Amino acid sequence: MFDREEVAMQDVETFAAALQRVRRQAGLTYRELAERAHYSHAHLVRAAGGKQLPTWEVTAAFLSGCGVPPDLMPVWRRHWETAGHDPQDVLGLLQLATTLEDLGSALATLARPRSLRTLARLTGIPRTTIQGWLQGTRLAGRDRLDHLVRAIGATSAERAAVAQAVDRISSGRSPAVPAA
């Protein structure tokens, strides 16, 4: 009923559709689920609406309320994180970044849906410092930024693109045009 294929999703809409399937398979209405999950009916409807990714807390309550076993929660968590960003979009943003604001936007996309508090806890870097990086008001050193993107779980291609963007912005160079 709640096999690993159910949680093989890539984006917010697909993730929301999987949540809807789990609720239907559990045979619950949203009102019944609200009683079990301890979130309002409207909150749970929005969580499965596909317009934006719900917080992990809401997602976990939704899944637990539907009877998803605890051993599948780490799988759902990984897919919830994946649904929060598209690696191709992040790479494109990083490859075209020419300003601190561009870099901050790409980093914010990469870090999504994690909060500043979570990022600070993962890295030991103060929230205000991370916030400056994500808002594009502060340029980080390559090593500190690499520490952040490693903690986020960035791919090696994403890490390399971040380092190249930092070098490019620091030196004032234009981005290289990707080969077609």
Image: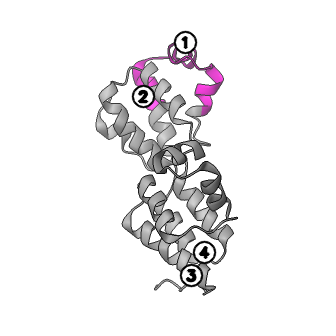
**Mark 4–mark 3 contact, CB under 8 Å?**
yes
User: Callout 3, which amino acid?
Assistant: Arg
Badge 4 amino acid: Ala
**Residue under the image location 44 percent in, 36 percent down:** 18
- Residue 52 is one of the magenta-drawn residues: no
| Above or below, 119 relative to 65 | below
- C-alpha distance separating marks 4 and 3: 8 Å
Mark 4 lies on residue: 97
| CA distance separating discs 4 and 2 | 40 Å
* Circle number at residue 168: 3
- Provide the residue span drawn in magenta: 20-46
Which residue is under mark 1?
A: 35
* Residue 1 appears in the picture as rendered: no
Q: Earlier in the sequence, mark 3 or mark 1?
A: 1
Q: Distance between the residues labelled 3 and 2?
A: 46 Å
**In front: label 1 or label 2:** 1
Quadrant in which the N terminus is drawn: top left
